[in-house]
Amino acid sequence: MKRYLFLLLLLASLQNTFAQYDFIRPVKDSIPGGYDFWVYTPTDYYYSLESTPVIIFLHGQSLCGRNLNRVRRYGPLDAIVKGRQIEALVIVPQNPGGAWNPDKINDVLEWTKKHYAMDSTRVYVIGMSLGGYGTLDFTATYPDKVAAAMALCGGCSLKDVSGLGKVPLWILHGTADRAVPISKSKAVVEQLQKDNNDKRLRFDWLKGSSHGALARILYMKKTYEWLFMHSLIDKDRPVNRDIEIGKSDLSNAYSDMISGAPDPEVVYDKTIY
């Protein structure tokens, strides 16, 4: 009897996992000169429609190229397949190489607005490494389109970072990062502080954490809970400071998922340096 119940539960879990694939759609050659990308529609999308938030994930250098399947190696799409419930349209473009282009990211967002019902007051951006740079570059360029952003082990390539002060922003970096020096994130924080433009800024330096270890944040439930707490509707746009992410959270990132995620030390993400 116990074995029969176990098999039923296993079958239900597998059906749920496989069902997620039906909602992950590749979009290729739809934006002239632009990025190809994936669009994930949540299971309740056709009930939520215009109230559905949007997450844009920007990957690191290791996933650059022309094979769109590469960008499913780690990050939100991989987390969804492994059981993480993310109630949002998840947009995952692929960078063919070089720095992320904020205008091309915006083209992807605008394409999505035309083809999918969505809540444009709740657009969130999260990126890691090269994608961390892309997150800050895009957010600084289009602050009025981003409800909140999270940049992992990256930096910013723009001289003018003033736009970042308009957006609830969380910057995280590991102190043991050998790929992208933590000084790159600190430089952004220090500039915002120097300009008294850090009202909506959060930052955490995770002691002893390596570059790859921060990939675990992309699998955490609280990561998406924090993003969803922000909206452009709130004119003051306060940053939520109640949810915490520390080094101790990294070890529990996959605890409530159907199957394990890749070892973050194996998902070693090369950078623009």
Image (cartoon, rainbow, N blue to C red):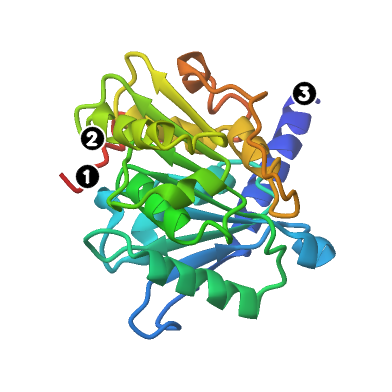
Q: CA distance from mark 3 to mark 2?
A: 50 Å
Given contact means CB atoms under 8 Å apart, are the residues at marks 2 and 1 in contact?
Answer: yes
Image quadrant occupied by the N terminus: top right
Q: Which residue is mark 3?
A: 2
Which residue does the image show at 30% across and 34% down from the upper left?
187
Which residue does the image show at 69% across and 54% down from the upper left?
232
Q: Position of residue 148 (x, y in %)?
A: 58, 46
Q: Position of residue 57 (x, y in %)?
A: 47, 53
**SS for dot 2:** loop
Q: Which residue is mark 2?
A: 180
Residue at the right extreme of this rendering: 47
Image quadrant occupied by the C terminus: top left
Q: Which mark is residue 139?
A: none
Which residue does the image show at 67% across and 55% down from the upper left?
122
Side (left or right) of 96 relative to 139: left
- 3 vs 1, front mark: 1
Which residue does the image show at 40% across and 19% down from the upper left?
206
Q: Which of 253 and 100 lies nearest the eye of the viewer?
A: 100
Q: Which mark is residue 271?
A: 1
Give the amino acid type for the residue marked by disc 3 in the picture.
Lys
Q: CA distance from mark 3 to mark 1?
A: 49 Å
Q: Position of residue 235 (x, y in %)?
A: 72, 50
Q: Position of residue 107 (x, y in %)?
A: 47, 74
Q: Quadrant of residue 82?
A: top right
Instruction: Please tell me whether residue 244 is drawn above or below residue 82 in the rendered image.
Output: above
